[in-house]
Amino acid sequence: MHFNFHRMQLYCESLTNYKRLQTLEVNIGGLLLGNGHPIRVQTMTTTDTMDTEGTVAQTIRCIEAGAELVRITAPSKKEAENLQAIKDALRSRGYQVPLIADIHFTPNAAEIAARIVEKVRVNPGNYVDKKKFEFIDYTDAEYLEEIDRIRERFSPLVRICREYGTAMRIGTNHGSLSDRIMSRYGDSPMGMVESAMEFLRIARGESYHNIVLSMKSSNPLVMVQAYRLLVQAMDLEFGVCYPLHLGVTEAGDGEDGRIKSAIGIGTLLEDGIGDTIRVSLTEDPEFEIPVCNDIVRRYNSVRRKEEIPEIAKLTYSPFEYVRRKTSSVENIGGGQVPVVVADMHQISEFDPSQMQSIGYIYDKETDKWSISDAAADFIFTGDHPVGFALPGTLKNIVHAAHWNPENASQFPIFQCDEFLSAERKSERINFVMLDAYSEEVALDSETIRTLSDDRTVVMCLSTKNENAVQSVRRMFVMLAEYGVSNPVILVTDSDRQTPDEHLIHFATETGALLLEGMGDGICLRFSGSSVLENPQVKGRTYLPVKDLYQFANNTAFSILQATRTRISKTEYISCPSCGRTLFDLQETTAKIRAVTNHLKGVKIAIMGCIVNGPGEMADADFGYVGSGPGKITLYKGKEIVKRNVDSDIAVEELIGLLRESDAWIEK
């Protein structure tokens, strides 16, 4: 695919300082979205839409948690019609938050809902088209005939929305691209973009513009690329951009769900892209809102414009993943998986039991170490070298003044000017701290070239700037301009308070760079007076945290897992519940996790219904999908293996499928 690099900034307003993308204004029942208005937060109910009182009660809980928009599924005409009863009940109780009808396969339901609620969401992958995983070789004429068929079926909804003042979201899902789009564009971000653009062109042809778009995927990398391509496509074709709804589908629950969401959503918000967000967690919907607020809070205040040089020419494509090519310094760089550096410098006296926090368990009786899949590669201890023999896979980083050259498992870390004047240096690895575009240290071309000439140097890149992602990214561009191939450790500091806030900060600022192929390792640090609190706040849950160092280590590995740069555990693609869900998603997800969480590298999709099932789990190795009340269909890849399995035995059947496929190992 060819990209116009001279126009590369079409996907955002600035690559060097945070600035919101200018989008059209959309009115959703009096709530204004886009055009510089605050980033709106929303969620989706999990109740049966025919349960009026249950849906009303859950919607109220979401509103009181802070939801500015609430989406309700309307899979058929009867649910669409019942939206009126739900809306009336809410309005009678004084709740005016706009409602959104979620439509998939049923245009008739959409046309009913558009006359009742303030917004409808349609999925271009299944609104008119069907998905049977069939390849169809269209001629250009045949393809245009299909577009005419879509126009005929979609235009009535557009006209109703225009007449009633109803907003619309054209929401593409990566996993539910139609056979027609897949046949021409493949399973690609560009296919996602074209799927939405076809519907957008039809709407514009009807002089209807009250539109929001989304490009959702369970893979943050695909999601980010698709949104960037969509912004570029709209700007090139129309000269304007419509507001964007951001979300990672099937993010899951707990730490993993928050991290995956923050990486996808946060990366785009750092680019100034995004006007409303939804965090899709396999938890009660009211618990999604505080996580949304934690993400959005980063963009509520005006950021200081920092003196970061503009980028004359981008040295990488922001629309595809290519990892930065680096030379190898022992186990760092050179195409090896990114390393994890655990920062434990605040401990003054170490004993082997403390290594358990970073994945190493010492057995005193046998004098042996047990090493987990999420075990750190380096431990930074500052002025306090570790005084006992470390396991062979773990190395100690200390300040240069405390480095012992005779200790083969110990390496020095220098400030930049300290390294340039140092007489003692390691012959193997020298870690050098660099502050990207700090006002205190000028990293000129001569300094960078001196460092790059030393093949033992591993650069540890951080920044004190508020525009941290932009500063570090600009530094990587400079390294490319100078031909520097030294590996780089991404060092990210967080001064947040709660576990959720730390997760979001670390995931956004580190994950955004990893998605662009930047970084050969990560180190997460708690800065200043940062503490980790678990306050009991009504209507909010926080992740339990007992061990600060374990929290940082687990977060580092989860970020690498979510960016697909280092796989250390089982990956779950788990959708949030909705009114279509045919079993208890939270309970089932927990049950499946409990018996499969030792299957490193296996991707298991847990889907509540057939709407999101076969499509959104297309990236998974195995799928567990609701196919009817109390019934489950099991998939291997895209292939159905067992239909209508009783839910009471479905987890055991899934384990049997894993065994048959040689994907099972005993704990």
Image: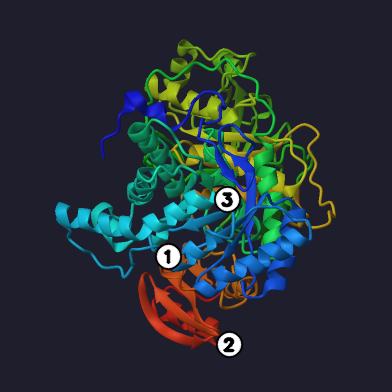
Q: Residue at x 51, y 40 (%)?
A: 243
Indicate left or right for 44 with 314 as reference: right
Mark 2 and 3 residues: CB-CB less than 8 Å, in contact? no
Q: Nearer the viewer, mark 1 or mark 3?
A: 1
Residue 463 % position (x, y): 61, 26
Identify which amino acid the numbered label 3 is placed on. Ser
Residue placed most toward the observer, 477 or 190: 190
Q: Position of residue 306 (x, y in %)?
A: 60, 18
Give the amino acid type for the residue marked by disc 2 in the picture.
Asp
Marks 1/3: CA–CA distance? 30 Å
Number of the label disc, if any, that sits on residue 107: 1
The number of numbered discs placed on residues in the rendered structure image is 3
Image quadrant holding the N terminus, namely top left
Instruction: Classify 46 as above or below 68.
Output: below
Q: Position of residue 656 (x, y in %)?
A: 46, 83
Q: In front here: 27 or 535?
A: 27
Q: CA distance from mark 1 to mark 2?
A: 35 Å
Q: Tell me the element at label 3.
A: helix
Question: Can I make out residue 317 in this image?
Answer: no
In the rendered structure, which disc, 1 or 2, sits on the residue that comes first in sequence?
Answer: 1
Residue kind at label 1, given as amino acid type:
Pro
In which image quadrant can residue 303 be found? Answer: top right
289 and 607: which is toward the camera: 289
Report crowding for label 2: few under 14, some 14 to 19, many 20 or more residues within 10 A (C-alpha).
few
Q: Residue at x 62, y 64 (%)?
A: 282
Q: Which label belongs to residue 261?
A: 3
The reply to whether discs 1 and 3 touch (Cβ–Cβ < 8 Å) is no
Q: Which residue is mark 2?
A: 648
- Report whether residue 16 is seen: yes
For the C terminus, which image quadrant?
bottom right
Tag 1, which secondary structure? helix
Q: Earlier in the sequence, mark 1 or mark 3?
A: 1
